[in-house]
Amino acid sequence: MSAEPSGTLLVDYDEATRRYDPVIGIEVHVELGTATKMFDGAPQEFGGEPNSATTPVSLGLPGSLPVVNEKAVESAILIGLALNCEIAELCRFARKNYFYPDVPKNYQISQYDEPIAHDGWLDVELEDGTVVRVEIERAHMEEDAGKNTHVGGATGRIHGAEYSLVDYNRAGVPLVEIVTRPITGVGDRAPEVARAYVQTLRDLFRALGVSEARMERGNVRADVNVSLRPTPDSPLGTRTETKNVNSFRSVERAVRYEVSRQAAVLDAGASVVQETRHWHEDTGVTTAGRVKSDAEDYRYFPEPDLVPLVPSRDWVEALRARLPEMPAARRRRLQDEWGYADAEMRDVVNAGAVELIEATVAAGASPAAARKWWMGELARTANADGVALEELTVTPGQIAELQGLVDSGRLNDKLARQVLAGVLAGEGSPEQVVAARGLEVVSDDGALIAAVDDALAAQPDAAEKIRGGNLGPVGAIIGAVMKATRGQADAARVRELVLERIKA
């Protein structure tokens, strides 16, 4: 047992999972990519001036009345269908009553006992190919709250802050919340399952086209519930809920931390407190938030300003017919088409490069070349810059163009990397960078012959050995020619010319 910096005792994770059975549950909120908010016509936009995208409805002003966004309902049904849920024939909105500065009405319009979708499942594939079926309890619609910014203090949280600012641009943004049933039977793989589940959902949202699903922007946020019990046959233990975790890695780390922390609490003979907890990305720990409220504490009751929703069966079936190929099936199809080994495809999936490689292949590159660039030079660049692959300032079309220059012999690999650096630096397309930097391979035999003759004359001993049948020094001559041409010679052609000039 060890103590982390705040003094909380931790049990080694492997030891904790040998003596306790972890049970997890995950609530995922996804912001829908509609043009306007859930219940009013305020625009939904990211990064606008604070409080610029508001109306009397999103500000909760007296007398304002909500109107349901049809596109948001459509997106919720698509999500429910993709999660193999039953779509309700009738559902209602409810008021979830609580006070917080970013909830201007003092209640949130959500769904309670009558969600739009319920009783579904999602198969989640782990890195080694193991498939875990996650049971979905419900997927319901609701509106997002505003955003508090706490100014001053060391943590960015309300404790210790000098003052707080509230931005209501996010208030009323349409959300779908997806709630799992307890995920049992996964043992020490609970963190891995949690991560893979959230990642699978993210891919699903993108495939459906209902959200950009960018976790770094908060489009997808996960609340991670963890509890421990002595054995798989024991009743469920008391759970904690770590709120608003917004990266795959953090989902996994939060589960591991809570398992280790709760094991230490139980080992000490104490009881786990049912509470919300905050995840700290910098230190990798959770800290206590507030005692977790139960449903009755929110005093749910039907929203009186909205009539029940009654999705017609014809509409539901029309939406079912629109469902795209699901991400897992698509990945299997692409792997077969591209000829990737299982490990290669897993690396591509884990790097978030499936769509990038698919687009690069569609633009004319071979699958092998597309994987080489995105999983090699570009992955190293993204890692060094601390960004996702998709955030790099290069397009799949440009990568296909770059590879075309290599395939045609106009660039070698070394020159191609220099051209890529120019593209990433904003110097234009690969063709434009080649022209501006003068990086094209020297293919003029006259220039190459002159360079070869100079290299042979500068290294007479090497030339004599080659004439005697010792081809070892050929590499040195080629190296001298490459240096003289700034790496722009075709090494294979240089070798041919060296041997021809020796014989001559």
Image (tube, rainbow, N blue to C red):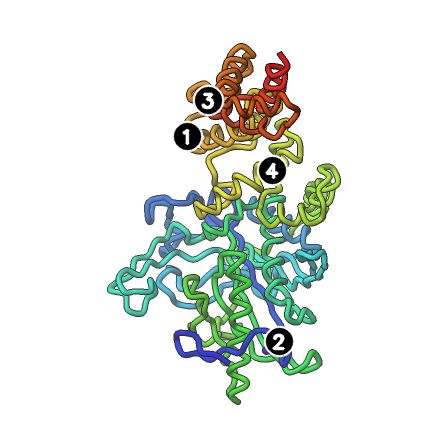
Q: Nearer the viewer, mark 3 or mark 2?
A: 3
Q: Residue at x 54, y 12 (%)?
A: 444
Q: Residues within 10 Å of mark 3 (few under 14, many from 20)?
A: some
Residue 94 pos. (x, y %): 53, 62
Q: Is residue 207 above or below residue 162?
A: above
- Lower position in the chain sequence, tag 4 or tag 2: 2
Q: Amino acid at mark 4?
A: Lys
Q: Residue at x 41, y 30 (%)?
A: 426
**Is mark 2 in CB contact (under 8 Å) with mark 1?**
no
Residue 495 pos. (x, y %): 61, 22
Please tell me in which quadrant of the rendered image residue 127 appears.
bottom right
Q: Which mark is residue 414?
A: none
Residue occupied by mark 1: 426
**Is mark 3 in CB contact (under 8 Å) with mark 2?**
no
Q: Residue at x 45, y 66 (%)?
A: 284
Residue occupied by mark 4: 372
Per the model, the C-alpha gap separating discs 4 and 2 is: 39 Å
